């Protein structure tokens, strides 16, 4: 099926109240017409996602933002002008007509304009903003290829648009403007440094139990295999009898014989590492290992988002529902 034909068909499904998985520059989303509460409810069902977790609304033009929100503070405007289309989500007070199921009853709404031609054409042809979480089962890694979506959600969705691997590979950065001052709810594809270079100091919201961005739940990206990030070469002996995989930041020599090594970026480039992160963890998770050791990446720029996802992937034992 040709791309344009597939997009036309996907848009028709959205207009009829169906759900479609589609590529964005960050990760694949599972979308429905924002104004169709029943269609949105099906997203929660398919993802087995708790109802308290609100969705991101995707638009195809910055001008559309004002139809969804009450007011756009100048700092939010500056960020959207600089980073849209792109991996930035803004949280603002919502207009009354947005169905509650989209925002999980919150008075605010999260909005972004993705930087991906397929996503933008789909939104335009659907003639409505598209509410979409990442297209994974709740609590697992976000999909960065159409194949990941197929493996997890398969025939439960009406159509999967295949746009190849997602170039950014890590979810959007979420910035809230609710309390007068901007706050970082989730680190992501636009770095904190880039954001602060446009609007100055941004408060970093700590992870909470009932967070304002429930995707911030500590154990939100957990693979089945335990992942350890705080390890020391000195302790590697105690792992000798185990089947261990290594999630390496860059290429280097290793003392321990690993069952499998995934290198995120041969040259140690954080952008490339972010793009490969979820696929690499999935491949390791599929090998039935006892343990995955992850190398830390420098915690600056996109490295912050990578470390955030790794920490979530390691924190087991927290109940999420
Ligand atoms: O890159 C992305 O953001 C991807 C692609 C598909 O756009 N989407 C994504 O969606 O990561 P999801 O649902 O997996 O994560 C959305 C996050 C959740 O942590 C949710 O709690 C938060 O956005 N969120 C949504 N609406 C919110 C609101 N009104 N206030 C605070 N957080 C909100
Ligand atoms: Mg998600």
Image (tube, grey):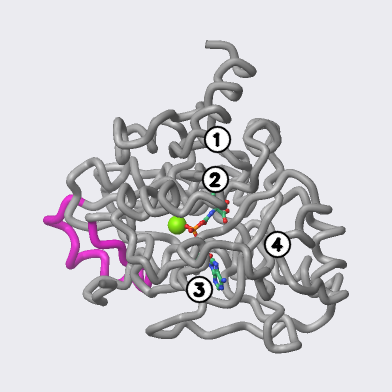
Sequence-wise, which precedes: disc 2 or disc 1?
Answer: 1
Q: Is residue 73 left or right of residue 242?
A: right
Q: Is residue 230 magenta?
A: yes
The structure residue drawn at horizontal position 64% and vertical position 56%, both measured from the top left corner, is: 189
Dot 2: element: strand
- Assess whether mark 1 and mark 2 are in contact (beta carbons under 8 angstroms): yes
Magenta residues, start to end: 225-243
Q: Quadrant of the C terminus?
A: bottom left
Image disc number at residue 15: 1
The structure residue drawn at horizontal position 39% and vertical position 31%, both measured from the top left corner, is: 158
Sequence-wise, which precedes: disc 2 or disc 3?
Answer: 2
Dot 4: element: helix
Dot 3: element: loop
Q: Tell me the crowding category of disc 1: few under 14, some 14 to 19, or many 20 or more residues within 10 angstroms, Cα based.
A: some
Dot 1: element: helix
Sequence-wise, which precedes: disc 3 or disc 1?
Answer: 1
**Which residue is the site of mark 3?**
213
Q: Is residue 58 left or right of residue 158?
A: right
- Assess whether mark 3 and mark 4 are in contact (beta carbons under 8 angstroms): no
The structure residue drawn at horizontal position 47% and vertical position 50%, both measured from the top left corner, is: 134
Rendering quadrant holding ligand 2? bottom left
Whole-percent x and y of residue 7? 59, 24
**Which residue is the site of mark 2?**
33
Please give the count of numbered marks on the rendered protein: 4
């Amino acid at each position: 099926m040709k791309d344009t034909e597939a997009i036309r068909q996907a848009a028709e499904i959205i207009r009829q109240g169906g759900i479609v998985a589609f590529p964005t520059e960050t990760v694949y989303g599972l979308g429905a017409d924002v104004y169709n509460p029943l269609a949105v409810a099906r997203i929660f069902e398919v993802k087995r996602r708790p109802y308290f977790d609100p969705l991101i609304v995707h638009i195809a033009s910055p001008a559309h933002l004002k139809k969804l929100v009450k007011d756009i503070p100048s700092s939010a405007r500056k960020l959207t002008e600089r980073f849209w289309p792109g991996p930035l989500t803004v949280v603002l007070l919502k207009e009354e007509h947005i169905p509650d199921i989209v925002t999980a009853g919150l008075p605010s709404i999260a909005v972004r304009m993705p930087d991906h031609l397929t996503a933008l054409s789909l939104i335009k042809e659907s003639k409505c903003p598209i509410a979409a979480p990442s297209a994974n089962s709740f609590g697992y890694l976000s999909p960065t290829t159409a194949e990941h979506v197929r493996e997890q959600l398969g025939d439960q969705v009406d159509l999967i648009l295949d746009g190849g691997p997602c170039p950014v590979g890590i979810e959007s950065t979420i910035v809230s403007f609710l309390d007068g001052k901007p706050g970082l709810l989730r680190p992501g594809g636009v770095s904190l440094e880039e954001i602060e270079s446009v609007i100055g100091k941004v408060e970093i919201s700590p992870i909470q139990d009932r967070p304002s961005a429930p995707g911030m739940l500590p154990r939100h990206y957990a693979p089945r295999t335990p992942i350890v990030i705080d390890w020391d070469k000195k302790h590697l002996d105690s792992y000798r009898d185990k089947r261990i995989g290594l999630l390496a930041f860059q290429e280097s020599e290793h003392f321990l014989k690993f069952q499998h090594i995934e290198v995120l970026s041969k040259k140690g480039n954080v952008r490339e590492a972010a793009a490969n992160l979820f696929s690499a963890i999935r491949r390791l998770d599929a090998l039935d290992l006892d343990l995955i050791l992850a190398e830390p990446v420098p915690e600056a720029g996109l490295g912050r988002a990578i470390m955030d996802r790794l920490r979530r992937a390691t924190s087991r034992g927290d109940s999420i529902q």
